[in-house]
Each structure stands twice: as C-alpha cells, then as structure tokens.
Amino acid sequence: MKTYRRIKADPAEWFAADEVAKAKDYQSPLTVVRVAKAVVSLAAMVAIISTQAAPRLLDALDISAWPLRLLVTFALLLVVFTLIDLPFSLWTTFVHERKWGFSTETPAGFVADELKGLVLSFVLFGGISLLLWLAIRSTDWWWIAAWIGFLFVSVVLALVFPVVIMPMFNTFTPLEDARLAERLRELARTAGLNISDVQVMDASKRTRKDNAFFAGLGRTRRVVLFDNLLAQPEASISSIVAHELGHWRRRHVARQIVLGTVLTFGLFVLLRFVSTWDGVLEWSGVTSFRDPGSLPLVALVFVAGNTVLGFVQNWVSRAFERQADVVALELTQDPDAFVKMMRDLVTKNLSELAPSWWAYVRGSHPPPAERLQLVELWRGGRTAEPAGRS
C-alpha cells in the first residue's frame, strides 16, 4: 500500500453523527487552549528578547563565568514558561478532562509531576545547552559540531528514555495475565521478534483513556500498554500490540532519529545565519552567540524552525502509522478485531473523528476513518487511491 499518501475516507461511513459531534465538542476547547498557549508563549519570548531581559539580568547579577550565565538564563526561561503553561495545564486537567470523565489526577500527583518535570528539564536541557555553548565558544564550525551532537543525543535519549525517564513518572510491570502474555509473545514471534514481556503502565492514576505505545532502541525496546486497556477483549489488545510490533518491525524509532537529524541540519544552518545577523543580535542585546544571554534568541529560532519541520515529521509519522496498521493486519489476520479495536478506542478517547485540514496536517496519526478505510483496502487487496499528499 502507498502509505505515504492520504486515503480517501468519509467519517460518516464509519461514525454516527452524534459520535462526530461529541468528539468535536470535546476537542474544540483543547484546540483553543493550544492556540492560546502558543500565542502567549510566543509573545512572552519576543518580550524577553526585545527588552533584553536575559543580558540585563546577568549584568545586574554581575555573573562573569559563561556556564553560570547560561544556567541562570536557562532557569529564567524555564520558570517563565512553566508559569505560562501552569494555568492551561490546570484547566485542562482539573476542569475540562474531569468534565468529560477522563482525568483521575490528584492535586498531589499533579504537583509531583510538575516538580519532577522541572528538575528533569533543568538537568537534561540545561546540560544540552551547556554542550551547545561549549561548541559555540570553541569553534567557528560549532553549527556542524552541534548537528552531529544532535544525532548522538537523540540516540542516547531513545536508549535511556524507557528505562530511566519514564519510570520517574509511572510504574511499569510485566503483563500478569499468563495466557494473554503468551498470546502476545506468539504474535511477536510471528513478527520475527522475541520479547520477554509486554509492559503495563499505571496510566489509570492520571486518566481513564486507553492507549499503548512503542519506545526505545536495542535492548531498551518495549511495548507498553495502559493498564486501562486490559479491560478490552483479547482480540482488541492483540491488534493494538500487533500495531506496536509494526513500529518495531519497521524500525520506526531509528528511522525517526535519522529523519530528525537530516531535517535538523537546516535548522542549524538557519541558526548559523542568525548568529551573523547584526540587527537581530542588537535587538536581543548581545554582540555574539558566545554570550549566553543570546539563549532566548536561540530558543526562538529552534521553536520556529521545529514548528515548520514538524509538518514534515508529522507527514512521515502518519505514513509510519499506516505501515504499522498494515503490519498489524498481516500479523493477526483479523481485520474485524482491528476495526472493533479502532472504533472502541477512538470513540472512548473522543479522538477527532472529522478533523479540519489544519488539524490533519499537524496530526501525527491519520484520522480514524482513514485508518478504518485502510482495513477495507487491505481486505480487498487494493492499493489506496491518493487524495493528494498531506
């Protein structure tokens, strides 16, 4: 199947009008919140740069050592944008998600997650910033060195994320249902993979939604099921795991790292161009990127560049999801179970069933109707007719 092309699908053929309307009622406020947060965050970043807040603060504190100047600037940005994000997160978690019966988050759990996230962000991204500025201050070819370093960091994060970072926020245990576990192991063997266990995550402490995901590289690769998902029929769970095995079989994590590295080269070229733009440097209150006070400007370039690159990455991600769906159908040979699983999952989670053009291009997954139509095309052994590139 031509998985990089959009499949024509009419949501009305797969979902009732009230299901589409209910999903839209749930999703619309979340879209407003995302847009509002993006606008406020952009305005804040522009204000920080135009008022030269970072270099002024560093001068007022009389900090001369560049690593300390960098970490103080990073802490400033981290605090500001955490405070911006906080009211949106509180409303989403404790108002909107509870209104729709999803959120099980407690105030204590929310605070704990926020604090852990702050510490992790400071250590992880603060450390990455130090490495970037070490390159900037060491060589005129810093943008090439930083680009190569991006690949290294991406691989390391993919390796350690499932075994170090995820357990900081959730508990992971092997699937206890011996019969189901053996069924899933047999499914993996059919895919040519050997897995010791499927991990179950205690997602129910935050949400009633169902989900599953694949993460990691090499020995850290794993399939993770939300504990909420275990209430579903075995055939549905098998279809979901088969989809995750599809990501594994098609080496999607590794391919995403390669894609991200290729696309990010353009981002570092842009950064190099901005570093020689005297007018922009003067606007931000620095004379060179060597000054850590330029961090807000660098961050703005990264955010803007990643926003554009994100459309390409999402297009590829949608193709990867279609590929994983095809693998799932080939492994299970049970399209009816896949259809039931998909319908149950998206209607329970109130996923967007009839997304707008904008929602489509910024989405990492094809719309549910398109994925269900793919099943019918697979049944008939036909090739999907393209409706234009996404």
Image (spheres, rainbow, N blue to C red):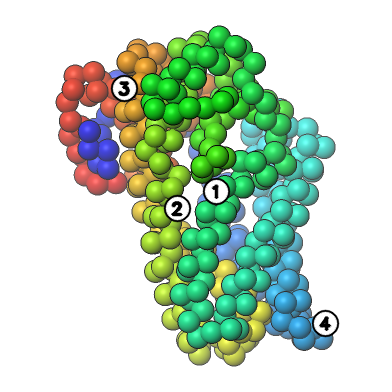
Q: Which mark is residue 183?
A: none
Q: Position of residue 298 (x, y in %)?
A: 56, 73
Q: Which mark is residue 257?
A: 2
Distance, label 1 to label 2, CA atoms, is 9 Å
Residue located beneath label 1 in the image: 158
Residue at image point 55% right, 39% down:
219
Residue located beneath label 4 in the image: 61
Q: Is residue 102 above or below residue 93?
A: above
Residue located beneath label 3 in the image: 330
> Residue type at mark 2?
Ile
Disc 1 to disc 2: CB gap under 8 Å: yes
Q: Position of residue 9 (x, y in %)?
A: 27, 29
Q: Earlier in the sequence, mark 1 or mark 3?
A: 1
Q: State which mark lies toward you, 3 or 4.
A: 3
Depth check: 189 or 369 in front?
Answer: 189
Disc 4 to disc 2: CB gap under 8 Å: no
Q: Is residue 359 left or right of residue 75?
A: left
Distance, label 3 to label 4, CA atoms, is 63 Å
> Residue type at mark 4?
Leu
Q: Is residue 140 above or below residue 29?
A: below
Task: Answer few, some or many: residues within 10 Å of disc 3's Cα (few below 14, many 20 plus, some between 14 and 19).
Answer: some
Q: Is residue 231 above or below residue 321?
A: above
Q: Earlier in the sequence, mark 3 or mark 2?
A: 2
Q: Earlier in the sequence, mark 1 or mark 2?
A: 1
